Image (cartoon, grey):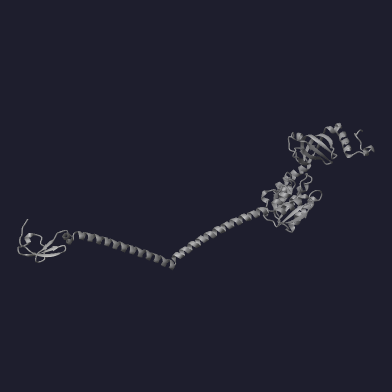
């Protein structure tokens, strides 16, 4: 057998692991039987890779075989592969040289019926559903702010660390009570039941989270056990089922009051977010401050208005009002009197002017005179005069006496 260039150890007859794996792979690749096989088995540990490849395990009652189906082959399938599904896988058997792992490279796969565990799962699911254990009416509301959270899971798994971290970040005030339990394998159903009953017996918490990380249908089977499902349904404390990843559903998911796709998501459902609550408190504080400020402003304005009204109704205000009224009326009276006096002065002046115009003295001042008889009466006609009678002639600056010596008529 030629392995190419030999190392010092190889010259002594020893082989490296890589050389041995390459040789075994070569033998398997050249074997006619292994180059084209059809394997019947149940899918387990199925993983859809982001590249489009499928990685899973084919198993039966006797053994398991690793399998890989590349994207080009997976895209031709006419069904969706699921854990627990019984299939016929066509392909070749070879070794993955790097890990030395024997596996089947599947080129085609067809549905060959439901596996035994999947059949039991569907049977029990139908039975419990008919009993009403999955009814929405049975679901209870989770407490908004729990004081204590009971967690039933493995104390060494990643699930408990995730739940502790999420709870501490979202609501540090919440206490966590861990009730350790087996979560897979023989004895897991009894351990889970004891933990549920123990937390209920002592009313030790406000909400119970029961769960674990993801896995194959076999790994999660304890959470499909009828005893566990019925014990969880009988819990007096509200429950959250957090078993597996987002695509995995167990019977505990259906019977619990709330189902979370992951343990971390269960912790988020169990406690509120303190950041959100702090923001709500801040918003409420702002609204309260604004309302108080508006109320104070309204009361202040009302107080000022009432004080003004009271001031207007006070004796001092009334006296001031009366004083202003008196002052106004006094000024008005003075104005009226002044007006009347002025009008009278104007009328007197006008009358004096008019009288001056008809004043006899004024007429006399222009060269006229007034003649009076001896009796002092004004003579207005020559017929009133007689010869040798005495008359008085009134001028503007005096009076003269005369005797009539001649009378002529016009």
Q: Is residue 241 left or right of residue 63?
A: left
From the top left corner, tell me how far across and down residue 23 is, in percent: 88, 35
Q: Is residue 231 left or right of residue 65?
A: left
Q: Quadrant of residue 101?
A: top right
Residue at (63% x, 54% y) in the render: 280
The answer to whether residue 235 of the structure is visible from this angle is no
Q: Quadrant of residue 283?
A: bottom right
Q: Is residue 85 left or right of residue 3?
A: left
Q: Nearer the viewer, residue 379 or 159?
A: 379
From the top left corner, tell me how far across and down residue 116 is, in percent: 78, 42
Q: Nearer the viewer, residue 222 or 143?
A: 143
**On the rendered image, what quadrant is the C terminus found in?**
bottom left
- Badge count: 0
**On the rendered image, what quadrant is the N terminus found in?**
top right
Q: Nearer the viewer, residue 393 or 306?
A: 393
The answer to whether residue 165 of the structure is visible from this angle is yes
From the top left corner, tell me how far across and down residue 42 is, in percent: 79, 40
In this view, 355 is above or below 30: below
Q: Is residue 200 left or right of residue 351?
A: right
From the top left corner, tell me how far across and down residue 350 is, in percent: 24, 59
Q: Nearer the viewer, residue 250 or 24?
A: 24
């Amino acid at each position: 057998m030629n392995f190419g260039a030999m190392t010092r150890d190889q010259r002594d007859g020893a082989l490296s692991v890589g050389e041995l794996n390459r040789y075994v792979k070569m033998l398997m690749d050249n074997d006619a039987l292994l180059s084209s096989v059809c394997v019947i088995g149940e899918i387990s540990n199925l993983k859809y890779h982001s590249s489009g490849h499928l990685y899973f395990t084919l198993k039966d009652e006797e053994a398991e075989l690793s399998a890989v189906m590349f994207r080009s082959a997976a895209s031709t399938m006419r069904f969706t592969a699921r854990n627990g599904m019984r299939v016929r896988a066509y392909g070749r058997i070879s070794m993955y040289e790097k890990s030395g792992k024997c596996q089947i490279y599947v080129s085609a796969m067809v549905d060959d019926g439901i596996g035994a565990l999947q059949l039991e799962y569907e049977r029990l699911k139908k039975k419990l559903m008919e009993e009403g254990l999955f009814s929405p009416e049975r679901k209870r509301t989770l407490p908004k702010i729990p004081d204590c959270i009971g967690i039933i899971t493995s104390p060494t798994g990643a699930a408990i660390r995730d739940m502790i971290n999420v709870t501490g970040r979202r609501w540090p005030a919440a206490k966590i009570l861990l009730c350790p339990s087996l979560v897979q394998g023989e004895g897991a159903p009894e351990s889970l039941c004891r933990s549920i009953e123990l937390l209920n017996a002592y009313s030790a918490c406000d909400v119970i989270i029961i769960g674990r990380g993801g896995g194959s249908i076999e790994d999660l089977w304890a959470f499909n056990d009828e005893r566990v499902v019925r014990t969880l349904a009988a819990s007096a404390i509200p429950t959250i089922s957090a078993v597996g990843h987002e695509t995995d559903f167990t019977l505990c998911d259906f019977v619990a009051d709330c189902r979370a796709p992951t343990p971390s998501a269960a912790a988020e459902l169990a406690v509120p977010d303190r950041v959100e609550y702090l923001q709500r408190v801040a918003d409420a504080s702002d609204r309260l401050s604004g309302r108080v400020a508006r109320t104070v402003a309204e009361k202040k304005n009302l107080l000022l208005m009432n004080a003004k009204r009271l001031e207007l109704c006070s004796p001092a205000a009334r006296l001031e009002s009366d004083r202003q009224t008196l002052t106004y009326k006094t000024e008005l009276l003075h104005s009226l009197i002044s007006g009347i006096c002025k009008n009278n002065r104007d009328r007197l002046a006008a009358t004096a002017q008019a009288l001056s115009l008809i004043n006899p003295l004024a007429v006399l001042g222009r060269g006229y005179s007034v003649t009076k008889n001896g009796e002092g009466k004004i003579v207005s006609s020559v017929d009133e005069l007689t010869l040798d009678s005495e008359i008085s002639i009134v001028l503007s600056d005096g009076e003269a006496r005369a005797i009539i010596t001649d009378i002529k008529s016009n």
